[in-house]
Image: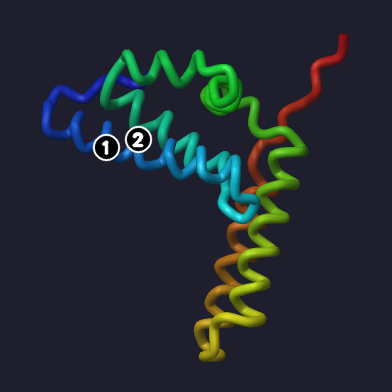
Amino acid sequence: MAQVHRSRAVRAIYLVLGVFFLALGIVGTVLPLIPTTFPVILAGYFFARSSERFDRWLTNHRVFGPLIRDWRAGLGFSVRAKTIALSAIVATFGFSVGWVVEPPVVRIGLVVFAIGLCVYILRLPTKQLERT
């Protein structure tokens, strides 16, 4: 676990950011086009620097805890998590580029950004399945 920041003001900012990203991750569990994994990891980052209590709660959470613990241990993401993330990126960016965004420069920028995100996710460690 990271060191909780000494400044009370900085801890408060980190706590607010942690709550925001956790809420975004929770929304992502319900809405298919909003990501869950990265907002929850960001929430873990901010909670670890804002409050030992919130960090402990998140790392022991039934749903989000394994994700945070695996990330911190360097185990990476499961193939399923990567597949969901890549599918969400392709769907949301594809929809935006195909039907929402008009200027060609913005379309090209979105495509380049989406490709960059996909490459980043593919380069992250893939969690090996435990064999019993």
Residue designated by label 2: 19
Residue at (67, 34) in percent of width and height = 77
Quadrant for residue 76, please give it. top right
Viewer-proximal residue, 76 or 66? 66
Q: In the figure, is residue 70 to the left or right of 27?
A: right
Task: Tell which residue pokes out farthest to the front in this image.
Answer: 30
Residue type at tag 1: Val
| Residue that protrudes farthest toward the right in the picture | 132
Q: Position of residue 126 (x, y in %)?
A: 72, 35
The residue pinned by badge 1 equals 16
Say which of 123 and 84 sits in front: 84
User: Tag 1: Cα neighbours inside 10 Å, few (<14), some, or many (≥20)?
Assistant: some
Image coordinates for residue 51, horizontal then vertical, percent: 28, 20
| Residue drawn 35% across the image and 35% down it | 19
Q: State left or right for residue 33 relative to residue 27.
A: right
Instruction: Tell me whether the residue at label 2 lies in contact with that at label 1, contact meaning CB atoms closer than 8 angstroms.
Output: yes
Task: Tell me the tag on residue 69.
Answer: none
Q: Secondary structure at mark 1?
A: helix
Residue ID at (71%, 47%): 84
2 vs 40, nearest the viewer: 40
Query: Could you say where residue 39 lies in the image, as x and y percent from the top left?
Result: 48, 42
Q: How many marks?
A: 2
Q: Amino acid at mark 2?
A: Val
Q: Nearer the viewer, residue 123 or 121?
A: 121
What is the CA distance from the residue labelled 2 to the residue labelled 1?
5 Å
Q: Quadrant of the C terminus?
A: top right
Please, which residue is most extreme toward the top here?
132
Q: Residue at x 64, y 48 (%)?
A: 121
Q: What secondary structure is found at the residue carrying circle 2?
A: helix
Quarter of the image for the N terminus: give it: top left
Q: Position of residue 86 (x, y in %)?
A: 70, 53
Quick check: 99 left or right of 20?
A: right
